[in-house]
Amino acid sequence: MKHSLPIIFALVIVPLLFSSCYSLKDSIYLQGDISKELNEVDGAFIQKTSDYIIKNNDVLYIRVSSLDERTSSFLNNQSGYTTMPESPMSASLLGYRVSLDGSIEYPFIGKIYVAGLTLEEIQAKLQLAVGKYIEQSSVIVKLLNDNITVMGEVTMPGRFMLSSEKINILEAISLAGEITDFGNRKRIRLIRKEGEIPQMFVIDATDERLIYSPYFILQPGDILYVEPRKFKAVSMSAVPFSLGVSLISVVILTLTYINTLDSGN
């Protein structure tokens, strides 16, 4: 009986353990060598803060207000919205998309070039244009596609609309419900589109120097991908209930059979 226990363990328990583990190679997205470690990037740990620059295909929320709302209403979107939209669908319908030539088409004012400018610069530019029609007016300009995506080994992966103008990596991970026990905190990929070419950086969230990095603050459209560890830890919760019951039954029957043989001897 005693000599049989190692065999039972090898035949039953070991397959159970391997059923809840799988290879890193089979689970990681975007495999290759184009990503850059932050240690390889010049100035990666020198803090730089700058305002977001508007690019082609960005969507802007623009609203003109004045002492007499009836006077300024002809310059506003006629959808009936008076507040910022809360979903990508409503944002697309409400906003003004920056065309490939870097401009937006605004009612009665015409084409306005905004690509390459900050939101404050666009606001000032529109204020001058609107002032020709309405005195004592104010212009509000916001970015509607102000969202990020967090995926991989996090509790709640998804796309998140941002409620503040700036958000850092740790705050983004918090929005996604934290990194799971299987997540590799030393390998978080940041995918960012700079110009027309996307860039990918590998970030070590355990390195305290990260808070001084220009990549610590996220930009609209950024994607965070938390890689899994080399092997996911063994977890009984990852084993199907029916499989667990079947294996336990096999163990019990095997032990009963062995006891029967021992009793006969």
Image (cartoon, rainbow, N blue to C red):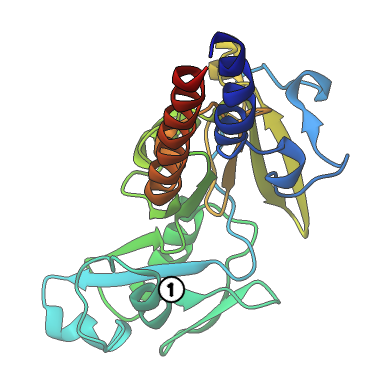
Question: Residue at position x 52%, y 51% from top?
Answer: 220
In the image, residue 11 above or below residue 199: above
Q: Looking at the picture, how far across and down is residue 16, in whole percent?
A: 55, 35
Residue denoted by label 1? 129
The quadrant where residue 219 appears: top right
Q: Amino acid at mark 1?
A: Ala
Most foreground residue, 9 or 146? 9
Question: Residue at position x 52%, y 30% from top?
Answer: 182
Q: Looking at the picture, how far across and down is residue 126, in whole percent?
A: 43, 68
Q: Looking at the picture, how far across and down is residue 96, in whole percent?
A: 46, 77
Horizontal side, residue 175 vs residue 226: left or right: left
Most foreground residue, 132 or 99? 99
Most foreground residue, 2 or 75? 2
Question: Residue at position x 74%, y 42% from top?
Answer: 200
Q: Secondary structure at mark 1?
A: helix
Category of crowding for the residue at label 1, using alpha-carbon neighbours closer than 10 angstroms: few (below 14), some (14–19), many (at least 20)? some
